[in-house]
Image: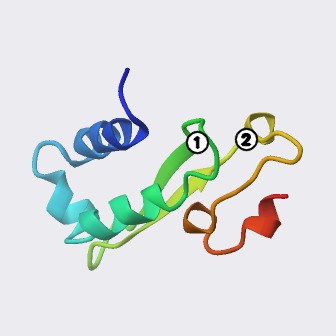
Amino acid sequence: MLSRSMLYDILYALAAVNGRERALFGSCQPLAREAFERSLACGAFPELWFELLLAGEPWFDLHALTASADVEPGMPFDPQTTGGNPEAFS
């Protein structure tokens, strides 16, 4: 079974194929991967999308969404994977 980080790498590689990485992501890949890993609030793979600029300097926003069905009442959350705010997920 593939890890969530490996699945992220596959999604990123598909978006970046054929020379699109520089045009779409610039040099942001390491920061985006780190942000993704900090966005894993529970064990499920989050809904994930990249919001990309279509012109100008390459830059993007990374969005990771955790479904409420994947969160159980009383589930502990790690401050490392909840932006330092685990109480927001309680």
What's the residue at 60%, 35% (across, down)?
44
Name the residue carrying label 2. 67
Q: Is residue 6 shown above or below 33?
A: above
Q: Nearer the viewer, residue 78 or 21?
A: 78
- Residue drawn at x 23%, y 43% is 13
Q: What amino acid is labelled 2 in the image?
A: Ala
Closer to the N terminus: mark 2 or mark 1? 1
User: The residue tagged with tag 2: helix, strand or loop?
Assistant: loop
- Depicted 3 relative to depicted 53: above or below: above
User: Looking at the rendering, which quadrant does residue 87 occupy?
Assistant: bottom right
Q: Identify the residue at the far left of this view.
A: 19
Instruction: Give the number of marks.
Output: 2
Say which mark, if any, is on residue 47: 1
Rendered image coloring scheme:
rainbow
Residue type pointed to by label 1: Glu
Please state if 8 lies on the left or on the right of 40 as rendered.
left
